[in-house]
Image (cartoon, helix red, strand yellow):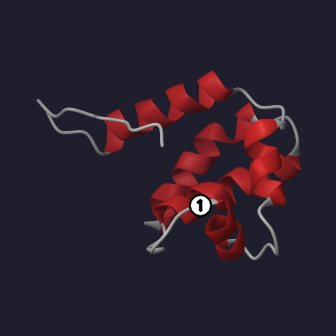
Amino acid sequence: MMGQLDRVHDRIAGRFRRSEPRGRAREYVSGLVAGLERKNGWTLAEQSGEVSPDGMQRLLRWADWDIDGVRDDVRDYVVEHLGEPGGVLIVDDT
């Protein structure tokens, strides 16, 4: 799975103007696909080695990045690499 995660991150990395949010975005997505029992700001931060969720919250609330571009890049990646003919992609924003 990490190979695909690296490819997704390479695709979206240019959507982040600064290196700190770019790296944190990779850690955030890594946490989302990890086998954590619960996924919230605290558990995602702990998974990435941070002591509080402040950095993850800063990424989602205030960091300067192209949100629509990241969405489009991830959607395109999913369709190109994980899609099935006749398949349906359902995205839950939670």
- Residue situated furthest top in the rendering: 68
User: Label 1 is placed on what type of residue?
Assistant: Asn
Q: Is residue 65 left or right of residue 85?
A: right
Above-or-below relation of 20 to 27: above
In this view, the residue in front, 75 or 42, is: 42
Q: Dot 1: what SS?
A: loop
Outermost residue to the left:
86
Quarter where residue 78 is shown = top left
Q: Residue at x 72, y 32 (%)?
A: 15
Quarter of the image where the N terminus is located: bottom left
Image-based side of 6 in relation to 64, left or right: left
Query: Which residue is pictured at 64% across the width and 57% down the height?
Result: 28
Query: What residue is rendered at 11% in x and 29% in y?
Result: 86
Binning the other alpha carbons within 10 Å of mark 1 as few (below 14), some (14 to 19) or many (20 upward) gives few
Q: Position of residue 56 (x, y in %)?
A: 75, 54
Residue 23, image x, y percentages = 77, 55
What residue is rendered at 62% in x and 70% in y? 43
Q: How many marks?
A: 1
Q: Position of residue 79 (x, y in %)?
A: 33, 34
User: Residue 27 sits in which quadrant?
Assistant: bottom right
Q: Which residue is mark 1?
A: 40
Q: Position of residue 35 (x, y in %)?
A: 44, 74
Residue 44 lies in quadrant: bottom right
**71 over 3 or under it: above or below:** above
Residue sitting nearer the eye, 35 or 93? 93
**Nearest the camera: 18 or 94?**
94
